Amino acid sequence: MVIATGGLPSLPGLDGGAGEGDELTYTSWDVIGGDVTPTGDVLMWDEAGTHSSLTAAEIMTRSGVNLEIITPERMLGIEVGGMNHVPYARAFNEGSVRITLNQRVLDVRPELGRLCVDIGSDHSDHREPRHVDYVIADSGTTANAGLYFELKPHSTNLGAVDYGAFIEGRGQSLVRNEEGSFQLFRIGDAVASRNIHAAIYDAARLMQDL
């Protein structure tokens, strides 16, 4: 049995990792799914650099918001291929979009009916505030692995992979639970936050030897 239940959006854990600012933050999934429609001044905090963050940014740009995209990377959309960058770049160029590189969101707090966002970097202690109406974050996903862990005690391999067999191209025959009735594996974002290419590679590499 192969579990491919994907992941759920991960919150960024603002306020130095304590997470109090997360309750003031929406995710890119909220924008893409239509659960929130930001207006006014919007800050997009992109830690992942994937299609989900840029798609959410494009949706907001086309709705007419004043958008700033902040990323800790040296370029925007680091996980997005060059050809796919073009339509995003066109949309951002045609809209009111400011792109800030090598910076990250450190804190979000309410202030005078808006949100005050502290912006900083990994390279100094300097902070600069932004006052906005919405903060949207994309911090990748957290594994949606509840089904995997529910089934794990009933599997013959207890959900484990024989990596030696994996590397040598042999089938999986690991037995850790003789009472089990099936083999169990998980792939893609059900393991960790990655991209669709990693999920397909997981599946191809595993299934070719089963």
Image (spheres, grey):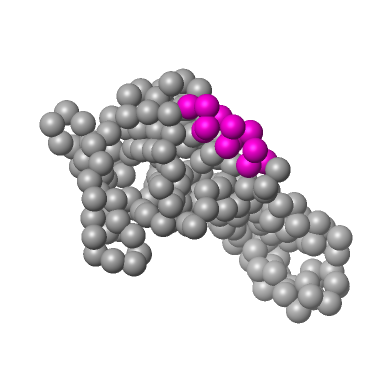
Q: Is 77 a magenta residue?
A: no
**Residue 161, image x and y in percent?**
70, 69
Number of numbered callouts drawn: 0
The residue at 23%/55% (across/down) is 127
Tell me what residue is drawn at x 66 percent, y 68 percent.
Answer: 160
> Going by the image, does 109 lie left or right of 187?
left
- For image coordinates 37% across by 54% down, the residue present is 103
Residue 111 is situated, as x and y percent measured from the top left of the image, at 15, 36
Quick check: can you spot residue 10?
Answer: no
Q: Is residue 179 above or below residue 94?
A: below
Classified by dominant secondary structure, the portion drawn in magenta counts as: helix
Can you tell which quarter of the image residue 24 is in?
Answer: top left
Q: Is residue 85 magenta?
A: yes
Q: Nearer the viewer, residue 2 or 52?
A: 52
- Kindly tell me whether residue 72 is visible in this rendering: yes
User: Residue pushed farthest left?
Assistant: 112
Residue 130: x and y, percent?
25, 41
Judge left or right: residue 75 versus residue 167.
left
Where's residue 33, x and y in %? 51, 27
Residue depicted at x 85% and y 73%: 170
Q: Look at the image and tell me in which quarter the C terminus lies.
A: bottom right
Start and end of the magenta stretch? 84-95
Instruction: Check the image and name the residue furthest to the top.
Output: 63
Between 156 and 106, the residue placed more toward the observer is 106
Image quadrant assignment for residue 42:
top left
